[in-house]
């Protein structure tokens, strides 16, 4: 397994857009795979946020996640977010999400990010709680109950 940036493997944009559409289209004002593809094309970076991280094995995409700006309008002071964590259904339960999240945290830290935020529908915090993310609050966002979490990225953090 290897990590890549979407910038280096843009041929995976259609697959990621399809995954995101199936998982989160109900949250979109205008559900469209094309809109998702267009948004992904704006994240073809590797040295600045926003960016998309890929986990690939034998030229097959196993999973993806994003580092992005201001995911939630109600938190204008919370700048950097982890989002779009998605593992291919056949690959779930193998610890791949943990690997992606750890790598994304390392990348964010290398880019000077001090605190990273996320929202999850798993109100227990799931894999994020296991990795040391701390809950901030539970809220309703776009009709769903979500847990907003944070993770400090100082030198003492893992």
Image: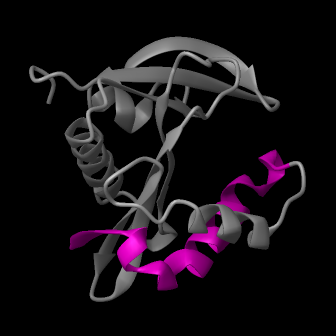
Main SS, magenta region, reads helix
Q: Residue furthest left?
A: 156
Give the image quarter of residue 75: top right
Name which residue lies at 37% across and 33% down.
Answer: 128
Name which residue lies at 35% across and 52% down.
Answer: 97
Quadrant assignment for the C terminus: top left
Name which residue lies at 29% across and 30% down.
Answer: 130
Q: Position of residue 58 (x, y in %)?
A: 27, 88
Q: Position of residue 35 (x, y in %)?
A: 77, 65
Q: Nearer the viewer, residue 119 or 6?
A: 6
In the rendered view, would you say 65 is above or below 74?
Answer: below
Q: Residue furthest front?
A: 47
Q: Position of residue 67 (x, y in %)?
A: 44, 46
Residue 20 on the magenta span: yes
Give the image quarter of residue 8: bottom left
Quadrant assignment for the N terminus: bottom left
Is residue 62 visible from the viewing direction of this image? no
- The colour scheme is one colour
* Residues rendered magenta in the picture: 1-28
Q: Nearer the viewer, residue 84 or 89?
A: 84
Name which residue lies at 48% across and 69% down.
Answer: 88
Q: Position of residue 135 (x, y in %)?
A: 45, 15
In the rendered view, would you say 37 is above or below 95?
Answer: below
For the image shown, how many numbered marks are present on the structure? 0
In the rendered view, would you say 57 is above or below 84?
Answer: below
């Amino acid at each position: 397994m290897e990590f890549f940036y979407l910038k280096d493997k843009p041929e995976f944009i259609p697959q990621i857009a399809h995954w995101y559409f199936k998982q989160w289209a109900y949250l979109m004002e205008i559900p469209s795979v094309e809109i998702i593809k267009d948004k992904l094309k704006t994240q073809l970076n590797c040295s600045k946020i926003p960016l998309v991280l890929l986990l690939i094995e034998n030229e097959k995409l196993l999973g993806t996640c994003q580092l992005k700006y201001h995911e939630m309008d109600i938190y204008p002071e919370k700048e950097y977010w982890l989002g779009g964590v998605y593992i291919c259904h056949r690959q779930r339960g193998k610890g791949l999400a943990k690997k992606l999240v750890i790598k994304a945290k390392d990348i964010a830290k290398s880019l000077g990010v001090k605190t990273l935020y996320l929202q999850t529908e798993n109100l227990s915090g799931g894999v994020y709680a296991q990795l040391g993310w701390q809950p901030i609050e539970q809220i309703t966002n776009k009709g769903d109950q979500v847990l907003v979490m944070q993770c400090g990225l100082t030198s003492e953090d893992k």
